[in-house]
Image (tube, rainbow, N blue to C red):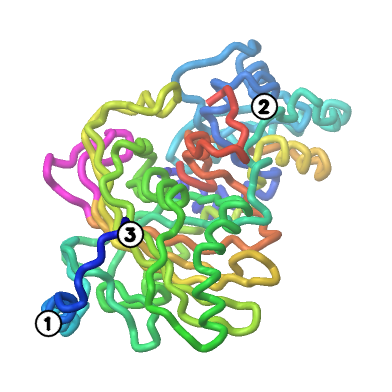
């Protein structure tokens, strides 16, 4: 049988809870440098912010510069056998670059 | 990793690469796997299909038919240029018949993780970066990875916020934060929010997860499209003791390490296409400790490094099917684990 708190006790309890929550709600939900307990904040349209910036903003900032992606301008085939097949079709020797961890991924 | 910048960004090397068909691959599999392709590779390089220890990283020049012409490993572009020139000279000295020898069936793989690419699910490209100390909006270093989620996993996630999406269609936007299914969060926390910026680090075990709170919140629903916000906090820390059974990753040096992040994201799920058509997620956090193979070996105990990760959608039909670094640790029925690694 589920216990139900008497209604007469509910109102003061709700009052107490809401009185605690209101000041919390007024605390600006601003991210902090350290990983404290503050939740992420939101923009006016509800989209989340982190350290005051949107996902799109951070995403643009995290874009590597062209110089660090220069190696990707070589048209690498992503596997040994795909490269060999393409080399056979092109009549060229195969240039195979091997790393621990895929060079086009996490190496 | 250094070769990306020093060798393969070098103008002379890039120009010379036009004389070849360029390809890349993962070397550890080729030197340790039982796969037919790996045995073929070892026979080509060493004349023997048995597994080899040490490192076989480097640059190889060979015929499509499987004859080795030159090889070497260096971060000096001039050294690689000499290897390429030597290989090209050897190629030109071959008979037309030898150059035209077809790709043998034994060069074709029996098992590749690329075969399990989730075309109908969610595939993400991850960029790992390091925040510059005292310049929190600047970043340095860069590594890449990929994160995969199957169609069934995404269907399951969709079901968790479908009710809120239906409400939003009727104009009722709930502020409820709906937990993202635990297996998906677990994958992110243990296998993708890892400090790989300067080189590969090991994965985390389920026992290492101290915090894994990631939620979705419906922002709007218009027509078939449902826009959601993703928010979360995660913390993972290991004592360095390997806890995940037999795996090549267990050979990473056993050192305490951890990662703690806050993350946000936005995504658009299309009801009719039954998939995410937009997805971007950013995590900011810190790492400490090191397995010592990821360029953090010299970091003092207690020192934390600020990091950032960005995950973005790989569009359907894109050629990028490179598997996640820890794909063999996914432990899901839709990926057949190779016995090789």
Measuring from the top left, give residue B339's x and y in whole percent. 58, 23
Spatial distance from mark 1 to mark 2, Cα to Cα?
A: 78 Å
Judged left or right of residue B217, residue B210 is: left
Nearer to the camera, B131 or B288: B288
In the rendered image, residue B303 lying in the magenta stretch gets the answer yes
Secondary structure at badge 1 equals helix
Magenta stretch, main secondary structure, is loop
Q: Mark 3 points at which residue?
A: B308
Specify the quadrant of the image occupied by residue B273: bottom right
Specify the quadrant of the image occupied by residue B263: bottom left
Q: Residue at x 67, y 61 (%)?
A: B316
Pointers 1 and 2 within a single chain: no
Measuring from the top left, give residue B171's x and y in whole percent. 51, 88
Extent of the magenta region: B287-305
Which is more foreground, mark 1 or mark 3?
Answer: 1
Measuring from the top left, give residue A61's x and y in whole percent. 37, 71
Pointers 2 and 3 within a single chain: yes
Q: Name the residue under label 2.
A: B69
Q: Name the residue under label 1.
A: A19
Q: Which chain carries label 2?
A: B
User: Is residue B140 at all visible to an observer of this figure?
Assistant: no
Q: Mark 3 lies on which chain?
A: B
Quarter in which the N terminus of chain B is drawn: top left
User: Is residue B114 at all visible to an observer of this figure?
Assistant: yes
Spatial distance from mark 2 to mark 3, Cα to Cα?
A: 42 Å
């Amino acid at each position: 049988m589920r216990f139900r708190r008497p209604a007469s006790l509910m109102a003061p309890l709700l009052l107490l809870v809401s009185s605690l929550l209101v000041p919390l709600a007024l605390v600006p939900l601003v991210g902090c440098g350290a990983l404290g307990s503050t939740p992420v904040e939101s923009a006016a349209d509800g989209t989340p912010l982190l350290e005051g910036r949107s996902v799109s903003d951070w995403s643009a900032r995290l874009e590597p510069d062209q110089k660090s992606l220069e190696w990707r301008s070589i048209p690498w085939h992503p596997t040994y056998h795909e490269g060999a097949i393409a080399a056979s079709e092109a009549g060229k020797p195969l240039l195979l670059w091997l790393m621990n961890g895929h060079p086009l991924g996490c190496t | 990793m250094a070769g990306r910048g020093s060798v393969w960004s070098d103008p002379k090397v890039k120009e010379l690469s036009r004389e070849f068909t360029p390809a890349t691959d993962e070397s550890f599999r080729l030197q340790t796997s039982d796969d037919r392709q790996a045995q073929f590779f070892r026979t080509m390089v060493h004349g023997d299909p048995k597994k080899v220890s040490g490192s076989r990283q480097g640059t190889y020049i060979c015929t499509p038919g499987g004859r080795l012409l030159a090889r070497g490993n260096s971060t000096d572009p001039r050294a690689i240029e000499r290897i390429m020139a030597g290989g090209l000279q050897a190629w030109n000295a071959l008979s037309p018949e030898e150059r035209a020898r077809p790709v043998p069936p034994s060069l074709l793989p029996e098992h590749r993780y690329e075969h399990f690419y989730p075309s109908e699910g969610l595939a993400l490209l991850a960029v790992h970066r390091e925040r510059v100390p005292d310049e929190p909006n600047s970043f340095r270093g860069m590594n890449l990875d990929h994160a995969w989620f199957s169609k069934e996993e995404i269907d399951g996630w969709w079901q968790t916020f479908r009710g809120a999406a239906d409400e939003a269609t009727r104009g009722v936007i709930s502020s409820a934060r709906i937990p993202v299914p635990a297996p998906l969060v677990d994958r992110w926390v243990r296998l993708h929010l890892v400090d790989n910026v300067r080189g590969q680090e090991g994965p985390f075990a389920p026992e290492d997860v101290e915090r894994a709170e990631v939620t979705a919140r419906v922002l709007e629903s218009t027509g078939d499209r449902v826009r959601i916000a993703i928010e979360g906090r995660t913390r993972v820390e290991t004592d360095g003791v390997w806890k995940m059974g037999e795996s090549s990753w267990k050979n990473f040096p056993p050192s305490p390490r951890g990662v703690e992040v806050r993350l946000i994201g936005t995504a658009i799920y299309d009801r009719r296409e039954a998939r995410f058509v937009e997805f971007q997620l950013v995590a900011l956090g810190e790492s400490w400790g090191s397995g010592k193979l990821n360029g953090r070996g010299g970091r003092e105990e207690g020192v934390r490094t600020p990091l950032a990760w960005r995950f973005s959608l790989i569009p359907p039909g894109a050629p990028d099917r490179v598997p996640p670094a820890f794909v063999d640790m996914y432990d899901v029925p839709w990926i057949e684990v190779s016995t090789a690694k």
